[in-house]
Image: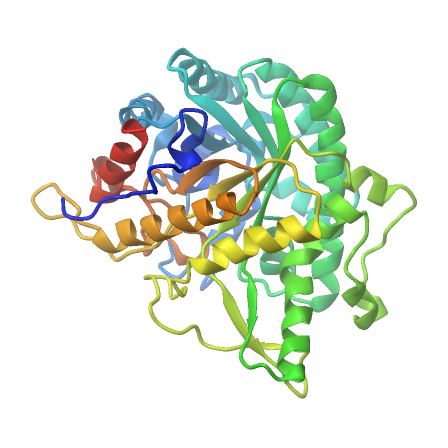
């Protein structure tokens, strides 16, 4: 193995109390579709031309069957923590009760993780809304926020003290904008009048769930995971800079400002009234519930320019890019963390997702993914640069533990540090996984 991961010898990221983990999401790896209710991604996958390769999550990585060997795999990597999501349609029945079989599946996992001293970072919502709730309006229906709160209440009581950390939502931007505004993710709704409304109900769901988690699980770290794609102006012109600020408000600040400042960005006033969310008295107090941590997901940046018709236009990303077409620009992660820390009074931060899609090939039982190792090395050092500037970052999670169902891309893009042969379900640790293990175990 040629490339490795290295940090400055004095880095706090090399101390024993810095948390290193790997992350997955239920729909992307589990399969076991017959043992749960349908969700919006099942419906989306069954709709022609929505998923690039026409695939679905019916089997995925068959983690539902192979979970024990997968936890042994996680243990073999030497990580401190495992970030997993709970499938809402697996654990809650249509009538809103706990599904004992579904709950037991996760209890088994959590108990084994605890026995191996691997911290469980649990995400309650990673996009797999039960289809029957979507049939009643989904995230456009305010009631869905209260349904989520009921689910959070039941499941956090069932899990007891087995969970180290709860995240309410993963990337509400993706759920609202990609799912309800431009329709490239489930449930595939298209309309600028939907996006902000869905976002508000998601954030309300988060706040309501935080109240529940604070009560039921006071000893766990409770927070939310947001994704950020920092916005850069194409030029120094005033027009481009204003367009870029608008884009940043629309895509990034929209989801964090309500959490810390109890209001939406001022950009709201520039949107047509029909696009505004319905904010009721008390909503912002609920949404701005105190957080124990903030999860930050980062992959790339975006470059914008002004436009006569639209508020902004994103330009094509410059090279180098990953296999999914995202620019590799690690300094944006440092700059993002610094800017968030300047804008808001942040709790401890965890980098809850970071990684790269690379066009991997397996040769003689090995995967030499040197480009992914370079990506990780640059981004781990970008995190270290932010820590050196005084930002409290307590952990880092590689996305993803294993290759899996990459949403609208199907199985065409590989993000894992473990290679999955989807025909045989054989797992092979890539060179990046071995490099990550070496970094962690040599602390």
Left or right: residue 50 versus residue 320 is right
Left or right: residue 263 versus residue 325 is right
Q: Residue furthest left?
A: 364
Q: Residue furthest bottom?
A: 308
Q: Quadrant of residue 63?
A: top left
Q: From the top left corner, tell me how far across and down residue 152 is, in percent.
A: 67, 27
Residue at the (43%, 27%) spot, across then down: 81
Residue at the (63%, 48%) spot, across then down: 341
Instruction: Decide: is 51 above or below 143.
Output: below
Q: From the top left corner, tell me how far across and down residue 82 is, in percent.
A: 43, 29
Q: Is residue 31 visible?
A: no
Q: Quadrant of residue 70?
A: top left
* Quadrant into which the C terminus falls: top left
Q: Quadrant of residue 75?
A: top left
Q: Nearer the viewer, residue 404 or 416?
A: 416
Left or right: residue 292 versus residue 359 is right
Instruction: Decide: is 263 above or below 364.
Output: below
Q: From the top left corner, tell me how far across and down residue 84 is, in percent.
A: 47, 32
Instruction: Decide: is 236 above or below 394.
Output: below
Q: From the top left corner, tell me how far across and down residue 268 is, in percent.
A: 80, 65
Q: Is residue 60 visible?
A: yes
* Quadrant into which the N terminus falls: top left
Q: Residue furthest right?
A: 281
Q: Nearer the viewer, residue 196 or 346?
A: 346
């Amino acid at each position: 193995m040629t490339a490795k991961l290295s940090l400055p010898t004095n880095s706090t990221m090399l101390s024993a109390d810095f948390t290193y983990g790997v992350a997955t999401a239920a729909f992307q790896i589990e399969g076991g579709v017959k043992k749960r209710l349908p969700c919006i991604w099942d419906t989306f996958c069954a709709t022609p031309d929505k998923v690039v390769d026409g695939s679905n999550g019916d089997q995925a990585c068959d983690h539902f069957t192979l979970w024990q060997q997968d936890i042994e795999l996680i243990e073999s990597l030497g990580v401190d923590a495992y970030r997993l999501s709970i499938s809402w349609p697996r654990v809650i029945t249509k009538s809103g009760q706990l599904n004992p079989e579904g709950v037991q599946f996760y209890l088994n996992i959590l108990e084994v993780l605890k026995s191996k001293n691997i911290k469980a970072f649990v995400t309650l919502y990673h996009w797999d809304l039960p289809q029957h709730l979507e049939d009643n309006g989904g995230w456009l229906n305010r009631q869905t926020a209260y349904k989520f709160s009921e689910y959070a209440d039941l499941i956090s009581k069932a899990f007891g003290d087995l969970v180290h950390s709860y995240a309410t939502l993963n990337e509400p931007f993706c759920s609202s904008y990609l799912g309800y505004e431009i329709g490239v993710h489930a449930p595939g709704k298209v309309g600028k009048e939907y996006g902000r409304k869905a976002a508000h109900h998601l954030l309300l769901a988060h706040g309501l769930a935080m109240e529940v988690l604070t009560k039921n699980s006071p000893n766990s770290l409770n927070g939310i995971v947001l994704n950020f794609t920092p916005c850069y102006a194409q030029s120094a012109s005033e027009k481009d800079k204003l367009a870029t600020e608008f884009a940043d408000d629309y895509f990034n600040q929209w989801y964090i400002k309500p959490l810390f400042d109890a209001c939406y960005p001022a950009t709201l006033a520039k949107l047509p009234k029909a696009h505004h969310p319905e904010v009721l008295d008390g909503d912002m107090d609920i949404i701005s519930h105190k957080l124990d941590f903030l999860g930050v997901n980062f992959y790339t940046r975006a470059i914008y320019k002004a436009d006569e018709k639209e508020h902004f236009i994103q330009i094509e990303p410059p090279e180098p890019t990953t296999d999914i077409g995202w620019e590799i620009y690690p300094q944006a992660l440092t700059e993002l963390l610094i800017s968030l820390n300047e804008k808001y009074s942040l709790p401890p931060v965890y980098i809850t997702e970071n990684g790269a899609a690379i066009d991997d090939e397996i040769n003689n039982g090995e995967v030499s993914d040197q480009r992914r190792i370079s990506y990780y090395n640059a981004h781990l050092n970008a995190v270290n640069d932010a820590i050196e500037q005084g930002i409290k970052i307590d952990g880092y999670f590689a996305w993803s533990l294993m290759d899996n169902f990459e949403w609208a891309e199907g199985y065409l893009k590989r993000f894992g540090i473990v290679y999955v042969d989807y025909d045989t379900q054989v797992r092979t640790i890539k060179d990046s996984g071995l490099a990550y293990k070496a970094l962690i175990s040599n602390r």
